[in-house]
Image (tube, rainbow, N blue to C red):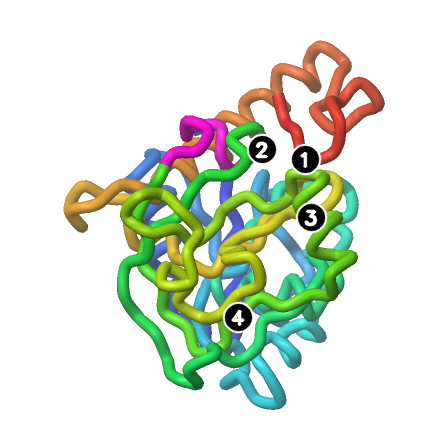
């Protein structure tokens, strides 16, 4: 096996097994569960914060999980260039922890939404999207009550300019219309990455669309892309280079 994915388990996580099956059955790679009280990432190549309701979403989604013991290691891992993916509640935790800008608040309709949505791949040159064609429209399920992405205009402009908006909600024609926006997110944003390009937060659930048995595999590309990124890093390590050294293309671009 080439890639080991560490999946953090908080009290209230409920998509951890789905992520594990996407990794083990969808890719044939290794998955390791990481308990929230642990201080060991088990030499994971990728860390995933899965969906669910960590600590019951008390205070606000992700607010308590941000202070979980294992987050000390996750923060160090991510800040050191480690590939980190936050899905739904995991996205909320990443924002609360300061690894991603902005915040996730209550859906504009103040109702829980659970259904497939259209997404457009806005940047196919990241460690999470190289398996997709640029601009490709995919369908992935959402399941959240606090999925409205908000940030100030300066932050939103910076995300756009630096190509850090990775996924955007779109309609059947691939356009980011208001009708296609399930939660009121600013500029139809569904997923963003940090300025170094190694941390992604995504509200829809790619793991729920990663196996043939589920009838849809549009989400598998996220995990395939991570596998390619890990393999590329291994080659770079052997050659004495890194995807995140000074020779890296501008922010938001991964080759």
The numbered disc on residue 148 is 4
Secondary structure of the residue carrying tag 3 is helix
> What main secondary structure does the magenta stretch of the protein show?
loop
Residue that sits furthest to the bottom in the current view = 59
Answer with mark 1 or mark 3, whichever residue precedes in sequence. 3
Residue that sits furthest to the right in the current view = 246
Q: Are marks 3 and 4 in contact (CB under 8 Å)?
A: no
Secondary structure of the residue carrying tag 1 is loop
Q: Are marks 1 and 2 in contact (CB under 8 Å)?
A: yes
Quadrant housing residue 115: bottom left
Residue 240, compared with residue 216, is above or below; it is above
Q: From the viewer's perspective, is the residue at label 1 or at label 3 nearer? A: 3
**166 to the left or right of 209:** right
How far apart marks 4 and 2 lie (CA) works out to 23 Å
Query: Which residue is identified by label 1?
Result: 252
Q: Is residue 42 visible?
A: no
Location of the C terminus (image quadrant) = top right
**46 to the left or right of 196:** left
Q: Which residue sits at x=41%, y=30%? A: 132
Classify mark 1: residues with Cα within 10 Å, few (<14), some (14-19) or many (20+): many
Q: Which residues are magenta?
A: 128-136
Q: Give the camera-side residue of 88 and 232.
A: 88
Query: Which residue is identified by label 3?
Result: 159
Query: Which residue is identified by label 2?
Result: 126
């Amino acid at each position: 096996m080439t890639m080991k994915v560490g999946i953090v388990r908080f009290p209230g996580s409920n998509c951890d097994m789905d992520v594990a099956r996407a990794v083990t059955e969808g890719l044939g790679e290794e998955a390791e569960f990481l308990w929230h009280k642990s201080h060991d990432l088990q030499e994971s190549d990728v860390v995933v914060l899965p969906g669910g309701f960590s600590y019951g979403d008390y205070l606000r989604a992700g607010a308590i999980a941000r202070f979980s013991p294992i987050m000390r290691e996750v923060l160090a891992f991510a800040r050191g260039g480690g590939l980190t993916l936050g899905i739904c509640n995991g996205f909320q935790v990443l924002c609360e922890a300061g690894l991603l800008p902005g915040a996730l608040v209550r859906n504009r309709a103040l109702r829980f939404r659970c259904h497939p949505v259209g997404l457009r791949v806005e940047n196919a040159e990241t460690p999470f999207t190289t398996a997709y064609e640029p601009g490709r429209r995919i369908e992935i399920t959402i399941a959240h009550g606090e999925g409205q992405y908000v940030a100030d205009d300066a932050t939103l402009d910076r995300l756009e300019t630096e190509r850090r908006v990775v996924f955007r909600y779109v309609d059947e024609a691939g356009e980011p219309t208001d009708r296609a926006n399930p939660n009121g997110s600013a500029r139809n944003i569904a997923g963003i990455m940090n300025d170094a390009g190694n941390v992604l937060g995504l509200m829809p659930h790619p793991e729920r669309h990663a196996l043939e048995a589920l009838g849809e595999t549009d989400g598998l590309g996220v995990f395939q892309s991570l596998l390619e990124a890990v393999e590329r890093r291994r080659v770079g390590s052997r050659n004495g280079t890194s995807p995140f050294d000074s020779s890296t293309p501008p922010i938001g671009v991964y080759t």
